[in-house]
Image (cartoon, grey):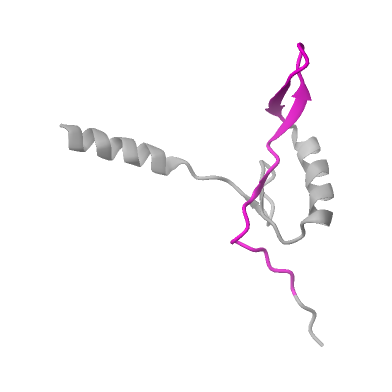
């Protein structure tokens, strides 16, 4: 009667698609920011392979997360407060 809804798993690490590997000038690879169109294409391919994963991207969709790094600033403020 009711279909099973796909649930995203929080115990698996998120897949970061904000950057893409590009061949550098001297043969090495470097990571450059990906455009939103490229992120959508990568996400569509990865969704077929990993349907229950979160993605770190700039698309602000239902399965997108954004890493919150404000805790680093709070730790630095606390350490500066304790040093005084």
Which residues are drawn in magenta?
5-33
In the rendering, at what x and y percent does residue 2 appear?
A: 79, 84
Which residue corresponds to the image point at 77% horizontal and 56% vertical from the top-left? Answer: 50
> Is residue 57 in the magenta section?
no
In the rendering, at what x and y percent does residue 72 appear?
A: 40, 39
In the rendering, at what x and y percent does residue 51 appear?
A: 77, 60
Q: Height in image: 28 above or below 53?
A: above
Q: Height in image: 68 above or below 79?
A: below
Which residue corresponds to the image point at 76% horizontal and 40% vertical from the top-left? Answer: 39
Identify the image quadrant of the N terminus. bottom right
Q: Is residue 11 left or right of residue 25?
A: left
Which residue corresponds to the image point at 21% horizontal and 36% vertical from the top-left? Answer: 81
In the rendering, at what x and y percent does residue 80 appear?
A: 24, 33
Which residue corresponds to the image point at 26% horizontal and 36% vertical from the top-left? Answer: 79
Say which quarter of the image contains residue 22: top right
Q: Residue furthest left?
A: 84
Q: Is residue 11 left or right of residue 21?
A: left
Q: Residue furthest top?
A: 26
Identify the image quadrant of the C terminus. top left
Q: Residue furthest bottom?
A: 1
Say which quarter of the image contains residue 74: top left
């Amino acid at each position: 009667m009711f279909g099973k809804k796909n649930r995203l798993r929080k115990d698996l690490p998120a897949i970061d698609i904000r950057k893409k590997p590009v061949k550098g000038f001297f043969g090495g690879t470097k990571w450059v920011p990906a455009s939103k169109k490229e992120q959508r294409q990568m996400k569509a391919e990865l969704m077929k392979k990993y349907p229950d994963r979160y993605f770190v991207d700039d698309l602000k969709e239902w399965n997108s997360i954004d890493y919150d790094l404000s805790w680093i600033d709070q730790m630095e403020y606390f350490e500066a407060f304790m040093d005084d």
